[in-house]
Image: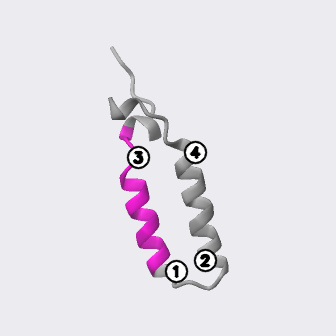
């Protein structure tokens, strides 16, 4: 059931947070790792349109 929950609002807020961290001078490597971890949580079907046959 959790795969049906729309987390796009949370992800947008997380992306804004990461961008602000970069602008405030936080270590880019650390921010990049946090971005990668966030992206790994996005289901494949939400990033790439999956054809259902």
* For discs 3 and 4, the disc positioned in front in the rendered view: 4
Identify the mark nearer the N-term, 1 or 2.
Answer: 2
Snapshot quadrant of residue 46: top left
Identify the mark nearer the N-term, 1 or 4.
Answer: 4
Q: Are marks 1 and 2 in contact (CB under 8 Å)?
A: yes
Identify the mark nearer the N-term, 3 or 2.
Answer: 2
The overriding secondary structure of the stretch rendered in magenta is: helix
Which structural element holds mark 4? helix
Identify the mark nearer the N-term, 1 or 3.
Answer: 1
Q: Is residue 35 left or right of residue 23?
A: left
Q: Which mark is residue 28?
A: 1
Distance from the alpha carbon under mark 2 to that under mark 4: 20 Å
Which structural element holds mark 2? helix
User: Relative to the observer, which residue lies in front, 40 or 52?
Assistant: 40
Residue with the mark numbered 4: 9
Which structural element holds mark 1? helix
Residues in magenta, as a range? 30-44
Q: Residue at x 44, y 79 (%)?
A: 30
Identify the mark nearer the N-term, 2 or 4.
Answer: 4
């Amino acid at each position: 059931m959790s795969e049906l929950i729309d987390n796009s609002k949370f992800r947008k807020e997380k992306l804004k947070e990461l961008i602000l961290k970069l602008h405030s001078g936080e270590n880019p490597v650390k921010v990049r790792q946090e971005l990668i971890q966030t992206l790994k949580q996005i289901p494949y079907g939400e990033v790439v349109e999956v054809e259902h046959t």
